């Protein structure tokens, strides 16, 4: 039987428009970075994957329907009736929608139905609230989506048009809870009647004048506040959070400047370059890192002294990415963690996992190899991986204590000492490749840190401050202390959690004091079933400040990279520490 041409086209086109839908791992996410694996009732969300709809994106119109371009998103609560989401946008790789407010809280499975085929369900949890600040590209720690009141209207806040002291601002949010109105259309502006505060720069608290629904975007919320005229930190990436009761959202970045014109950042971008980036020009990066990591093992046998295993290496990468994915690098806080020198923070397990979309990075070619020279005759040719375009080398390691029964083996404990990272000047040279031109970069390690008393660190009393001391670091270095413990939650022993702390100090401070108020929030360390050791760890890391090794290799197509950093770090890790 001969099939008519129009019918044949219809059959083939239908088959080409939709592949079998598949939801990516951890692909169901809140539209505003918040606790992963959870969606709030009435909140905007998105799904990443393949074959989720037509290849070209189709935008829905208000009032949103439950089917768009042949795609539906179905929520199946555990023991409840299924419900379909309201759809805002669909494409082959992404679906955006709104969770029905009447969907019951609890465990739920999500399925995408596209072209008549259903994906394998993804497990998530529906909760009454999962508040977060909306960011460009839904990137965790990215640039906040917001506006500043100027004249009779609101102006979008960007790196080229930052917020200013004394202005009224509003920041977009999602996940504040169910909407007692129609989910498929704009909601009237309605405050939730809860007190909220903006935390700016990690310290300054500003009372919010409005916390509630966003009348312009279904599924989204708003927080408004009047910025103080004085005392604000300034820069392209000032950390901002929203505190509601005793809960605080994840950080986003708010550009702030004292007057007209772009924000100021140590990267030194011009207004012209910022405009190009905002219009879609990609950001180019160059990073090179010397790293030395010593793992300290204290064995149960008292007759065997602590064992140190040191691994050293070098990694360099040259990348091209969009502004949304680069944005977390704009953070004015050291290390991007919102800490000033001498400060500590608690890391909850719900904040540890990044639920944001993975960065779309294009790797660039800087030549077949890089040359690294340093003190004590160090001379290494670092080859490029043909697959990843990364430049990596693992130097031989050193073990300071022999293992009974084993002969000395280079690279293993008791083997020949091969440490290559020492105090002194280092020079990195590249002859250039298809994307990156010839360049040179230099850094200097003035002194390498020693951790004092690590061999006596066996237990941490969570009711007392923990004092960690070191020698050898300088005022030009940062020293980070970190700890982690896995065990029953102090407030709910039936729930197993992983929590940690992070603290920052100048290298010449010589010590970091972790307060008991933070340690007490960590769980008592369980014992690892396989290793038989407490599930706790403490680390101490010395690192260079970014400004000390900045370099900007030329681009083969003209101009130079937007940000380049040649840095080093020296880390000590002490596993098997018991938090009690």
Image (tube, grey):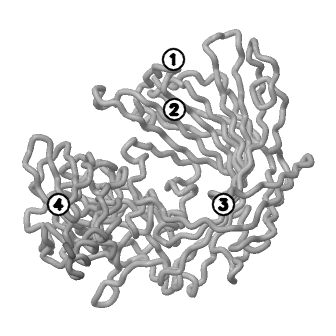
- Sequence order check: which comes first, mark 1 or mark 2? 2
Q: Name the residue nearer the viewer: 92 or 170.
A: 92
Q: Secondary structure at mark 1?
A: loop
- Sequence order check: which comes first, mark 3 or mark 2? 3
Q: CA distance from mark 2 to mark 4?
A: 43 Å
Picture quadrant of residue 203: bottom left
Q: Name the residue nearer the viewer: 430 or 420.
A: 430
For this view, does 103 lie left or right of residue 260? left
Q: Secondary structure at mark 3?
A: loop
Q: Name the residue nearer the viewer: 42 or 222.
A: 42
- Sequence order check: which comes first, mark 3 or mark 1? 3
Q: Can you give x and y, in whole percent of width and height, for residue 89 in the image?
A: 26, 72
Q: Is residue 511 above or below residue 453?
A: below
Q: Secondary structure at mark 4?
A: loop
- Sequence order check: which comes first, mark 2 or mark 4? 4
Residue at 40% of width from left, 29% of height from top?
A: 523
Asked whether the viewer can see residue 31, the reply is no
Q: CA distance from mark 3 to mark 4?
A: 43 Å
**Mark sitting on residue 42:** 4
Q: Secondary structure at mark 2?
A: loop
Residue placed under numbered mark 3 in the picture: 389
Q: CA distance from mark 1 to mark 2?
A: 26 Å
Q: Can you give x and y, in whole percent of width and height, for residue 329 in the image?
A: 54, 64
Residue placed under numbered mark 2 in the picture: 465
**Mark sitting on residue 532:** 1
Q: Mark 2 or mark 4, which is nearer to you? A: 4
Q: CA distance from mark 4 to mark 1?
A: 45 Å
Instruction: Name the image quarter holding the N terminus.
Output: bottom left
């Amino acid at each position: 039987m001969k099939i008519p041409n129009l019918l044949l086209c219809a059959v083939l086109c239908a088959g080409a428009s939709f592949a079998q839908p598949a939801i990516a791992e951890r692909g169901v996410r809140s539209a505003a970075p918040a606790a992963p694996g959870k969606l709030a009732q009435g909140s905007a969300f998105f799904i990443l994957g393949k074959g989720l709809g037509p290849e070209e994106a189709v935008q829905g119109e208000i009032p949103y329907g439950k089917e768009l371009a042949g795609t539906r998103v179905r929520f199946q609560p555990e023991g409840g009736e299924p419900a379909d989401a309201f759809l805002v946008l669909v494409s082959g790789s992404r679906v955006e929608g709104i969770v029905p407010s009447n969907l019951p809280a609890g465990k739920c499975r999500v399925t995408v139905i596209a072209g008549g085929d259903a994906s394998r369900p993804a497990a998530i949890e529906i909760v009454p609230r999962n508040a977060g600040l909306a960011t460009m590209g839904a990137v965790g720690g990215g640039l906040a989506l917001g506006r500043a009141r100027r004249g009779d209207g609101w102006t979008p806040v960007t790196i080229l048009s930052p917020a200013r002291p004394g202005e009224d601002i509003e920041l977009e949010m999602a996940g504040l809870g169910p909407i007692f109105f129609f989910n498929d259309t704009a909601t009237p502006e309605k405050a939730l009647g809860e007190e909220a505060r903006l935390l700016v720069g990690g310290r300054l608290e500003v009372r919010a004048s409005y916390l509630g629904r966003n009348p312009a975007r279904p599924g989204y919320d708003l927080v408004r506040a009047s910025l103080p005229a004085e005392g604000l930190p300034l820069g392209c990436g000032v950390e901002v959070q929203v505190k509601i009761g005793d809960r605080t959202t994840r950080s986003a970045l708010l550009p702030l400047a004292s007057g007209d014109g772009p924000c100021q950042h140590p990267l030194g971008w011009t207004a012209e370059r910022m405009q190009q980036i905002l219009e879609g020009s990609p950001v180019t990066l160059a990073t090179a890192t010397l790293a030395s990591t010593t793992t300290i093992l204290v064995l149960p046998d008292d007759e065997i002294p602590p064992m140190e295993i040191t691994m050293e290496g070098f990694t360099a990468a040259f990348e091209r990415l969009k502004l949304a994915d680069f944005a977390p690098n704009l953070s004015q806080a050291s290390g991007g963690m919102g800490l000033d020198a001498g400060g500590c923070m608690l890391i909850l397990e719900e904040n540890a996992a990044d639920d944001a979309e993975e960065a779309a990075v294009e790797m660039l070619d800087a030549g077949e190899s890089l040359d690294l020279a340093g003190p004590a005759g160090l001379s290494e040719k670092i080859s490029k991986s043909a697959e990843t375009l990364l430049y990596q080398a693992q130097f031989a390691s050193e073990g300071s204590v022999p293992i009974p029964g084993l002969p000395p083996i280079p690279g293993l404990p008791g083997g020949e000492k091969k440490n290559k990272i020492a105090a002194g000047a280092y020079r990195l040279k590249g002859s250039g490749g298809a994307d990156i031109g010839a360049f040179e970069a230099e850094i200097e390690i003035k002194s390498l840190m020693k951790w004092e008393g690590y061999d006596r660190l066996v237990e941490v009393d969570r009711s007392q401050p923990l004092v960690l001391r070191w020698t050898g670091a300088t005022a030009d270095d940062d020293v980070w202390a970190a700890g982690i413990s896995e065990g029953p939650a102090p407030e709910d022993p039936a729930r197993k959690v992983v929590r940690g702390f992070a603290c920052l100090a100048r290298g010449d401070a010589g010590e970091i004091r972790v307060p008991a108020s933070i340690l007490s929030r960590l769980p008592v360390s369980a014992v690892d079933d396989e290793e038989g050791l407490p599930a706790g760890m403490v680390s101490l890391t010395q690192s260079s400040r970014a400004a000390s090794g900045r370099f900007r290799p030329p681009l083969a197509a003209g101009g130079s990279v937007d940000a380049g950093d040649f840095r080093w770090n020296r880390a000590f890790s002490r596993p098997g520490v018991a938090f009690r």
